[in-house]
Amino acid sequence: MQVTLRIQRFDPEHDSAPRWQEYRVDADPMARVLDLLHLVKWEQDASLTFRRSCGHGICGSDAMLINGRNRLACKIRVDQLGRRISVAPLPGLPVVKDLVVDMDGFFAKYRSVRPYLINDQPPPVRERRQLPQERAVFDDTTKCILCGACTSSCPSFWARSEYVGPAAIVNAHRFIFDSRDEGAAERLAILSDRDGVWRCRTIFNCVDACPRGINITRAILEVSAAIVERTT
Ligand code: SF4
Ligand code: F3S
Ligand code: FES
């Protein structure tokens, strides 16, 4: 089928502001938006710039605003979108070129919550053991691929870019509730800051955007409850 792909372009060397450019491509209904972007780049316009790596929803590098919603270009298909498809960079983040955004601030916030196991006890001979029910408490938040779709869809983040954002909270949750970890107090102190969890207004855009189906708002509320529990 014929698909009209409307892509937001921006080349900092030539453009003073973003502009839209249309391309027509022959596409199979089961083709993914990433396939269409490749078709344009390989056959019509080699200057089109976008990030991708795995092509299968694992690396998180090709999150974009597709028909008005944050999606992974390698996961969403033509038959889910129709004959007119618009593609723009993730909102709320500085555009580097075309569909590529600057993720430095996003990853700085991710690092700020210390997203790794903290445990100063000498390691046991074989492993730090954990019961299945202890693992289940944070199973959902282990699924994050750091695509940025949640944080960049959040109106609280658009209003105040200092907000640590849902992705960082999800990754803090993953360790705060890990029975083997001893860094919860430190992370909860970081997230009780005025740009921490209290900036969330339970708008749920993040849940809609997450390609991994993580219940982000529930994770944020669990972290908020843990902060309250520690301070009362
Ligand atoms: Fe992407 Fe979901 Fe992780 Fe947010 S929580 S960065 S949307 S995978
Ligand atoms: Fe934003 Fe998600 Fe909270 S969209 S306001 S982080 S529920
Ligand atoms: Fe890796 Fe889409 S290219 S998630």
Image (cartoon, grey):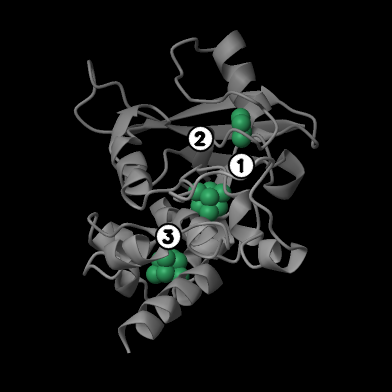
Which residue is painted at 49% across and 65% down in the image? 205
Ligand 3 lies under 8 Å from the Cβ of mark 1: no
Q: What percent of the width, then of the height, locates residue 226?
A: 43, 77
Q: Nearer the viewer, residue 166 or 51?
A: 166
SS class of the residue under badge 1?
strand
Above or below, 118 relative to 220: above
Q: Nearer the viewer, residue 205 or 88?
A: 205
Q: Are marks 1 and 2 in contact (CB under 8 Å)?
A: yes
Which residue is painted at 22% across and 15% down in the image? 13
Q: Amino acid at mark 2?
A: Arg
Which residue is painted at 49% across and 9% down in the image? 46
Pointer 2 residue: 6
Q: CA distance from mark 1 to mark 2?
A: 7 Å
Above or below, 62 relative to 15: below
Where does the C terminus fall, quadrant-wise? bottom left
Q: Which quarter of the frame holds ligand 3? A: top right
Q: CA distance from mark 2 to mark 3?
A: 33 Å
Q: CA distance from mark 1 to mark 3?
A: 35 Å
Q: Earlier in the sequence, mark 2 or mark 3?
A: 2
Q: Amino acid at mark 3?
A: Ile
| Residue 154 placement, left or right of 160 | right
Which numbered dot is residue 84? 1
Pointer 3 residue: 169
Ligand 2 lies under 8 Å from the Cβ of mark 3: yes
SS class of the residue under badge 3?
helix
In front: label 1 or label 3: 3
Q: Nearer the viewer, residue 141 or 2?
A: 141
Number of residues whose C-alpha sits closer than 10 Å to that of mark 3, classed few (under 14), some (14–19) or many (20 or more)? many
Q: Amino acid at mark 1?
A: Arg
Which residue is painted at 44% across and 81% down in the image? 225
The picture quadrant where one finds residue 35 is top right
